[in-house]
Image: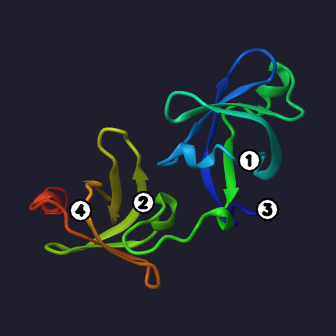
Amino acid sequence: MNKADCFHLGYVAKLHGFKGEVSLFLDVTNPEDYIDIDNVFIDINNQLTPFFIESFKLKNHPFAAVKFEGINSEMDAKIILRKNLYLPSSILKELEGNNFYDHEVVGYKVFDEQYGEVGVLESVIDLSVNPLIQVMNGSKEVLIPLLDDLVKKVDRENKILFINAPTGLISLYLD
């Protein structure tokens, strides 16, 4: 499995008990969408390695307590600590309209209705109180709150995100 064919699910955050269970940080909008997965790929030395799930319990959003097959002690679990988790992009249902997966729009050009071309979307910062899109315009960073009515159109064919940012926000960063 190649990273290009996958999306970043999160990472192994810490040990959870002493029998090999770990706590995963799920860097996704809806962690409950992943409670039925039976395996993940863990990046170990730049190699995506499959790990099969024995048990998966959602804890405090966005964490899950997970027991992997073959990981039966703290020593076993330490090998995968702070390693990134991936799943094949093919498992995701295709979204339509203005709905998108956070990883899907990374690299898209961003155009604002008032300002025009803002830059390239670098990441979606999924803060629970105030999610943001991070757009880079050369070396300048623009942070825009991902409000419900912000995105006006997702042009998947041309990789463009059309938005309507609050009046004057983009100018604060770029002018």
**What residue did someone put label 4 on?**
149
Drawn side of residue 136 relative to residue 30, left or right: left
| Secondary element type, mark 3 | loop
Q: Is residue 103 above or below residue 67?
A: below
Name the amino acid, label 3.
Met
For the residues labelled 3 and 4, the Cα–Cα distance comes to 36 Å
Q: Closer to the observer: label 2 or label 4?
A: 4
Q: Nearer the viewer, residue 53 or 36?
A: 36
Q: Nearer the viewer, mark 2 or mark 3?
A: 3
Q: Farthest residue to the right: give it.
A: 70
User: Residue at label 3?
Assistant: 1
- Ranked by sequence position, the earlier of labels 2 and 3 is 3
- Cα distance in 3D space between marks 2 and 3: 24 Å
Q: Residue at x 14, y 59 (%)?
A: 166
Side of 137 relative to 88 (left or right): left
The amino acid type found where label 1 is placed reads: Asp
Q: Amino acid at mark 4?
A: Asp
Whether label 3 touches label 4, CB < 8 Å: no
In the rendered image, the vertical position of residue 104 relative to residue 111, given as above or below: above
Earlier sequence position, callout 3 versus callout 4: 3
Give the crowd class for mark 3: few <14, some 14-19, many >=20 residues within 10 Å. Answer: few
Disc 2, disc 4: CB below 8 Å?
no
> Is 128 located above or below residue 145 in the figure?
above
Q: Secondary structure at mark 1?
A: strand
